[in-house]
Amino acid sequence: MYEFRYRRADSVDEAAALLTADADAMILAGGQTLLPTLKLRMGQPTQLIDIARVAELRGIRLDDCTLTIGATTTHAAVAESAAVRRAVPALAHLAAGIGDPLVRNRGTIGGSLAYNHPGADYPAAVLGLDATITTNRRQIGSDEFLQGMLDTALEPGEIIVAVSFPIPRRTGYLKFSSPGSGYVLTGAFVAETTAGVRVAINGAAPCAFRHADFEQALTANFSTAALDGINVPEDELLEDLHAAPDYRARLACIAVSRAVDQARGHGPGAE
Amino acid sequence: MIRISLTVNGVPIDAEVDDRTLLVELLRNTLRLTGTHVGCDTSACGCCVVHLDEQPVKSCTILAAQADGSQVLTIEGLADGEQLHPLQAAFRAHHALQCGYCTPGMIMRGVDILKRFPDADEDTIRRELDGNLCRCTGYQNIVAAIRACTSGSAPGEES
Amino acid sequence: MAFACVVRSPIAHAKIDEIDVTEAAAAPGVLAVLTGDDYAADGLGLLPVDGIPAGLSGGDWFRTPFPALTRERALCVGHAVALIIAETSFQARDAAELVAVDYEPLPATGSLAAALEQNAPPVWSERPDNVCFVHELGDAHATQRAVDQAAHVITHRVVNQRVAGNPMEPRACIGEYDAETRRYHLITATQTPHRIRNLLAEAIFQVPPARVHVRAGDVGGGFGTKGNLYPEDILVLWAAQRTGRPVKWLSDRSESFMADFHGRDQVADAELALDQDGRITALRVATYTNLGCQVGPSGAIPPFTGASLLSGVYAIPAMHVTLRGMLTHTATTTTYRGAGRPEANYLVERVLDIAAAELGIDPVEIRRRNLIGPDQMPYTTAVGATYDCGDFPAVMAKALALADWDGYTKRQASSAAKGLLRGRGLAMFIETCSVFGEEMQIRFDADGNATVLAGTFPQGQGHETMYRQMLVDWLGLPGDAIRVVHGDTDVVPTGIGTYASRSMTVGGSALRAAADDVIRKARDIAARELEVAAEDLEFTHGEFRVAGTGVMMSVGDIARLAYRSDADTLTGTGRYDANLRNYPNGCQVVEVEVDPQTGQVELVRHVGVDDVGRVLNPLLYEGQVRGGIAQGVGQALMEAVIHDEDGQLLTGSFLDYAMPKAYDFPEILLDTHNTPTATNPLGVKGAGEVGTVGAPPAVMNAVIDALSGYGIDDLPMPATPQKVWRAIQRATQP
């Protein structure tokens, strides 16, 4: 790694002030994405500001309509939370499959969303459930928050504080993982809400995206039969050693179908 | 440089290290606890697994500074004097190690698997080892050793 | 301690116009920056090559110059161009980025496939066709006649892809130079300390071997990749001599993908001639092995050794093999577990399955018809290997029974009910082991404790346990009175190392000879002490007993007695030279489930039956087989070192190079059907590599069987989900 200065922030305000004062400072939460990147010398921050112990960033809260998860909540904590399992089972299932068990003990929802790597899991949930990202300055809707590959609506000095998920009727998440890295190759988060069905596909494209045809079909008929004949366009899908665009497009359809099965109570991961 | 204080295997430690120092580097280079190993640089292999505040983590993906104020347990801290931890004894009995490089990470992970899944079956154990690579054994005896320590198996049960 | 960092080429082929080290040399903490020019100026030698026989049919081979740092050209991604030595490893890495190398990119032959095309850029001007060596085995005319007269000729190209050995411990070394004694001291993660010592002395520093000391502690896996002299071993010693400081080099995993010698990387064109009953009448093979840009110390061994095994376990009357070592702008290759035998067996077993499908013969039956029978032993194949013993039909039958081959249709139906395609495959295999000789010494101390000085050197094979067990059995010593010393060329006088599945055979046989030496000497001492004739002493379970009485002395007693007069009285030395190879063989049977929607392959059943002569320690033996199977499965299903057409390494870390994990395997069932070999006193055949040799064809035959319903008859390794899916797409879309 290149040289940097490590600092610990005791509050969100303190972290934000440090960020604003130094454009090359970066937030360190779990570090499970940031530290590997720095170890490969891809990135040269001047400072790392550790927010892992900021109390206001932790915790899971559940009320009648909303599940709110603090930004530094680990994937393991989300996976094991009785509240998450009850309210949004596919979210617990998603968290339980991020990386590996050791990584899940450190990686955080805030870190995952702030980085918005195409192979990340959480962006699909955020988009699929129309979550709201609360930062130290404002609230940002899911469609606006995820802007592109490794790109979010966060402005300099802006820190994710919590993520709020409206509680849906039924959910399902299924992904295919890239061999080696374990990143999402292609996955789908399906949520049946009072306002219709949302379908978010991750891994396949530079950024997680919704699919209107799937959403319309499933809103009319929440079953795998409704998916027949609907395809995912290949253009703009990612290409690498492990999956070309046509394969990702096909996997996306399969992921949506299996996520629907899961939401309906069948198949792997179903409650 | 940064000053840090933490407890390692029950012993309070004070050290001054480069801010970039990883927890595994602190353990190996500063504290000479060389039982924790480095097998990769992309957080894949799990040879570096230790317990941080009772949770198994990859010490190559944590800065020593992040562990300031924490409790760390390494493989060196597992045995009770001359008395091996039951999982260490099981690894020996089941020939669950060959070169031994992945073994400390496997055992530290295994101890946690047993805590969280006291009745783990073979399938669960294999899945829970997702973050640990071994190149020598083909995993079968590692799984057997962990399984032998689950509450479902009788003492001395051979695979 | 000072720290070294190697500056490596990011380009597969480039002319190096200039290397500007001024900024790097002035960086904080830097003690020295060394280049290929400095290496040449200091008169250091080139890495030598073993294993190329004299009298190649294609004429002399081209000796690729292999200095530890390259000078005028970079010939592969990762080629070592310069060396930084600094006070800390952080400083060494920081300074490495300041070395300004002026690369002039040139067209590259970035893979073996590229080398086989017309007009591939030459790596060396001396070999415009990139052929380093050519050799032929067998009888070209007889083979041609058989092919001409055959009822069927199956033609097939087989690709055995490049893989990385990836022991979990990356390589590391520490070099020291003692100016007073003028001795070089190297600590390195190696499988072959004495070999490294000899090569450093003779080829590199050109000093007497006594001036070089090599030692290794615990080595975290080797699998052949650590059985070589590497440039970094040389560089740390040279750097220590230049700076007067000990110098440490640690490889991280990404660097190891560039700096370690890789494995496999062979293309083979096969023609199998059969009569109308499916009996093989001839096999003609042309193999092309990618040696890399520079031939490594062991790089030539796989193609030659593999060629000698191309008859497999089958009676093939006529064979003709042409083997070629090819040069490309990729990293050097070496002997990775199996070293040529996985390539050979993969070819034979895949071609047989293809022949079975084409001729409409069951894959078990076509093998049965062609197996060499136990009554035909010893059998000399058409490529000149003499198999001394083995019962191939019995091994196959046992494997089929263990795998419940006959109960398959039930399992296939239950897979189908889940929407999955089940496939099954089997592969026979034979391989060859045990090279060179070994010397072992047994010494005793005043308390009668024994020390074994061993020239072999394990990286997890459990020699301490095995040698201890042997001395407990042969000399009746208590287990805790025996220790094994190895891995230090100053302490162990001579040795070869551990690779090629040689340690139990060669090391064990040498230890047997050493134990016999101890017993001979002990007998004489006991006879004098007990005042009887030596012949009147019976020796059993470590005790010399006066026949017909209760009077006895144990080896331990004798050792303690002997020590009082002369510490060396009872020292036993034994030597064994493996003039005859042994031939472990076996059969693996595999079942897989394929998800036709996604192409994902799951291994659901894996059985192996081996003939390893005798099993000395079942736990250690099974550990070796399962570990080898895991690596073979890795090659079949997920592993590959991949370069793009410019020679760029695309799989440079564990992010892109998939390694098998625990959940990739079912329980692996093993059994043996041993025919002890008379080629060594212990009757053993080497067990270290059998798993890796047998697994890839068994797995791929199963995968292709699962896909046979689509008319798919071949699929190259690794059978990744995308590859399987694409094969299904091609077969099902018009």
Image (cartoon, coloured by chain):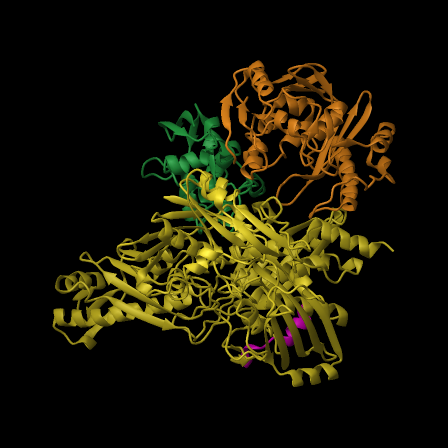
Chain colours: A orange, B green, C yellow
Q: Nearer the viewer, residue C419 or C4?
A: C4
- Residue at point 73% right, 53% down? C724
Q: Nearer the viewer, residue C401 or C426?
A: C426
Tell me the quarter of the picture where residue C393 sits.
Answer: bottom right
Residue C643 in sight: yes
Residue C362 in sight: no
C428 falls in the magenta region: no
Q: Is residue A239 above or below residue C262?
A: above
Image coordinates of residue C98 in percent, x first then y, are 52, 42
Q: In the visual, does C431 lie left or right of B84?
A: right
Screen quadrant of the C terminus of chain C: bottom right
C371 falls in the magenta region: yes
Image coordinates of residue C293 in percent, x first then y, are 57, 62
Q: Nearer the viewer, residue A259 or C726?
A: C726
- Residue at point 36% right, 53% down? C241
Image coordinates of residue C725 in percent, x first then y, are 75, 51
Magenta region: C363-376
Q: Is residue B21 above or below residue C694?
A: above
Tell me the quarter of the picture where residue B10 sits.
Answer: top left
What is the tally of numbered marks visible in this picture?
0
Q: Nearer the viewer, residue C59 or C375?
A: C59
Considering the whole magenta stretch, tell me its main secondary structure. Answer: helix
Screen quadrant of the N terminus of chain C: top left
Q: In the visual, does C348 lie left or right of C259?
A: right
